Structures are given as C-alpha cells and as structure tokens.
Image (spheres, rainbow, N blue to C red):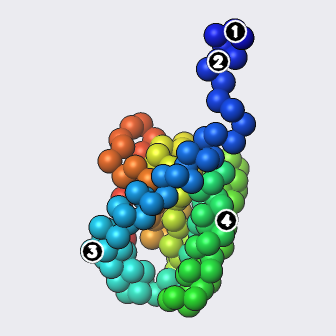
Amino acid sequence: MSQAEATVPAPGSLFRSEIFEQPAALERLLGANEEIARIAATAVARNVQLVRMVGHGSSDNAASYGVYAFGLLPRWTAVRDSITLTVHYDTPIDLSGSMVIGLSQSGQTPDVVAGCSASAGAIAVQATHRMAMAGPHRMPDISA
C-alpha cells in the first residue's frame, strides 16, 4: 500500500465520525439556551414567517430535521434552501420576514457563509458543531 493510499479515509468514515460527534454537539446546544432564547425572541419580534436552512452534506441532512422541528414547535414554515441564486448568480432576493440558518460543521464553508451574508433583510444565524473556530470564512453571529 502506498503512502497516498494509506492517508485516504475509508468511504463513509468522515460521515460516521460526524454522527459520533452528535452527543457532544447536543450537550453544547443545551448549554446555549440563553443564546437560543435571544435568537427566538428576535425572530418573534421581527415576525419571522419563514426559516431558510442552508448547508451541505450532513449539515444539509440536519435541515430535514429542522423542517419538522420548526413546523411542530413554533409552527413556522421552514425549508431546506439552496444558496445558488444569492451566492453563485448574485441575485438579490428580499428575505424580509425570514431567518436564514447557515448549517456548517466548522462555520467556515465559504458558500454557506456567503449565503448567510447575502441574506438581505433576514435574521442570519450560524449553527456549527465547533462554535469556537475562527477563520477567514467564519459565519457572522446573529444579525438583527
């Protein structure tokens, strides 16, 4: 086996490791109740009518759960959304009355960050597994 072959992860190993990160991520989420309450209060005050969730891979899969969670709990319409129009085609869309949640393991996925930044009129929120990470493509904190 060559050295290059030895460094290639087994198919599905990254996804599997992300699944095993879930208990720790949920624990961090439970520790963020005050921040979540602040985001929810901002959304209610701004009369949010639509929650748009953007991400890739397992983060996008988490949005499937979010559609049900936002529909059942606060009874908001929520969608797994594409960022292609706003990011890749630079199409301005009026997102007033909505909340955009960027879902990214690291908070550094460039087009997810750009999608949140291009969400004019919306509340933009980041949701990451590693909130402490910083970098050139870090998602902004909630904007009101």
Q: Quadrant of residue 95?
A: bottom right
Task: Give the residue at mark 3.
Answer: 34
Task: Give the residue at mark 1.
Answer: 2
Q: Is residue 53 visible?
A: yes
Q: CA distance from mark 3 to mark 2?
A: 45 Å
For the residues bearing labels 2 and 1, Cβ distance under 8 angstroms: yes
Helix, strand or loop for disc 3? helix
Front residue of this view, candidates 62 and 118: 62
Q: Position of residue 26 (x, y in %)?
A: 42, 64
- Lower sequence index among marks 3 and 2: 2
Using the image, determine if residue 22 lies above or below residue 107. Answer: below
Q: Position of residue 64 (x, y in %)?
A: 66, 69
In the picture, the quarter occupied by the N terminus is top right
Front residue of this view, candidates 85 and 37: 37
Task: Give the residue at mark 4.
Answer: 81
Q: Amino acid at mark 3?
A: Glu
